Image (cartoon, rainbow, N blue to C red):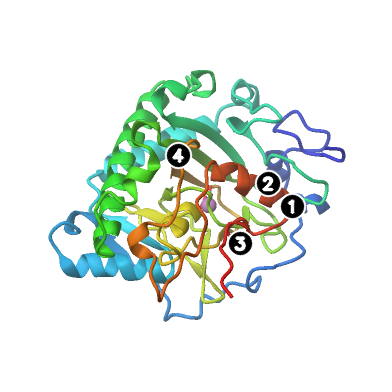
Amino acid sequence: MSGNVVVSEGKSVGKSVQEMSMDGDEPPPQFVVKEHPFGSKQCNSSSESIHIPIIDVSLLLSSEQELLQLRSALASSGCFQAVGHGMSSSFLEKVREVAKQFFALPVEEKQKYARAVNESEGYGNDRIVSEKQVLDWCYRLTLRVFPEHKRRLAFWPENPADFRETLEEFSIKTKAMMDQLLRSMARSLNVEENSFLKQFGGDSAMMQARFNFYPPCSRPDMVLGVKPHTDRSGITALLQDAQVEGLQVLIHDTWINVPAIPDALVVNLGDQMQIMSNGIFKSPMHRVITNREKLRMSVAMFNEPDAEAEVGPVEALINGTRPRMYRNVKNYGVINYQCYQEGKVALETVRVAHN
Ligand code: OGA
Ligand code: NI
């Protein structure tokens, strides 16, 4: 753990990202992205032919066509923009607003919720796991929202005053949408509709909220807001900034911009759904780029199976032409985290070899 220059906002040996952002500094070496193991560094947004599909969640129960769209989106890119999810524009704006108000607080106020060095919950920068690690140009506030008895309210901002109730409402609504999506995903593959959902462990399923803040950077070509990764979750829903773009998904070796659609939630699958679907659905590689002028924010909601639950490919999706692709796993979060530290692709370590 030596060589950590930026430990957390305000409490750092060097300048914080926020200070560097405001002063227009060139990013220091530990933030500079040197290698690009996944796809080219430049975004190939000239490939106009690839779009992130838009799915109307309210149609999934009645429209066979919408269900087919869902299936094809998840089998090809593993992500889509969800509309018709029942959350109003004003409510989504409210979620963005409380997040921005929190981030605008003085550093000392935010430090009250600072993440401890070896923990994931709280406010701060990247958790530093190796000296070679390239740091993300961002701040995060990570909070566990479900199961409810595992909430650590000490990390839940009291300022702005409606932060907690807004997050509570957003969590309940997002969870309801995800549960419906998980049933639709099963139906789209003609398997029993609870095949995926039941593997999350019912009331023990875990949901984490991550508020991401990406300050402007004088050299967006040198850094990333978030390095390329796949989510360890089962399913992730992301409320993007209403105006400022930055999220890119790797599709057919090309980084595709995910447009900002103010009323939509970006849904992407995580590794555990790739496992449960026996590889039919994809957990997409994604990253975030920064820009010179504007702060970007996003709120990611990660829904993942209870760490104690055994997760594996749905039996009905294993057959002669599609043999079992992954072994059953428990506590995939730990596998994913260890692999991240060792620079390995987590899904590859749970793959079943067929000769
Ligand atoms: C994440 C993530 C994307 C974004 O938090 O895992 O991919 O746009 N965030 O903030
Ligand atoms: Ni992600």
The span from disc 3 to disc 4 (Cα, nearest Å) is: 20 Å
The span from disc 3 to disc 1 (Cα, nearest Å) is: 13 Å
The span from disc 1 to disc 4 (Cα, nearest Å) is: 25 Å
The span from disc 2 to disc 1 (Cα, nearest Å) is: 6 Å
- The quarter of the rendered structure image containing the N terminus is top right
Q: Residue at x 67, y 53 (%)?
A: 217
Who comes first in sequence, dot 3 or dot 4? 4
Proximity of marks 2 and 1: CB atoms separated by less than 8 Å = yes
The span from disc 2 to disc 4 (Cα, nearest Å) is: 19 Å
Label 1 neighbourhood size at 10 Å, few (<14), some (14-19), many (20+)? few
Which residue matches tag 1? 342
Is label 2 in a helix, a strand or a loop?
A: helix
Label at residue 348: 3
Please state the horizontal and vertical placement of residue 60, each as a whole percent of the image: 20, 58
Which residue matches tag 4? 309
Identify the image quadrant of residue 111.
Answer: top right
Is label 3 in a helix, a strand or a loop?
A: helix
Label at residue 226: none
Closer to the camera in the image, 55 or 184: 184
Is label 1 in a helix, a strand or a loop?
A: helix
Who comes first in sequence, dot 2 or dot 3? 2
Which residue matches tag 2? 338
The span from disc 2 to disc 3 (Cα, nearest Å) is: 13 Å
Q: Residue at x 45, y 65 (%)?
A: 279
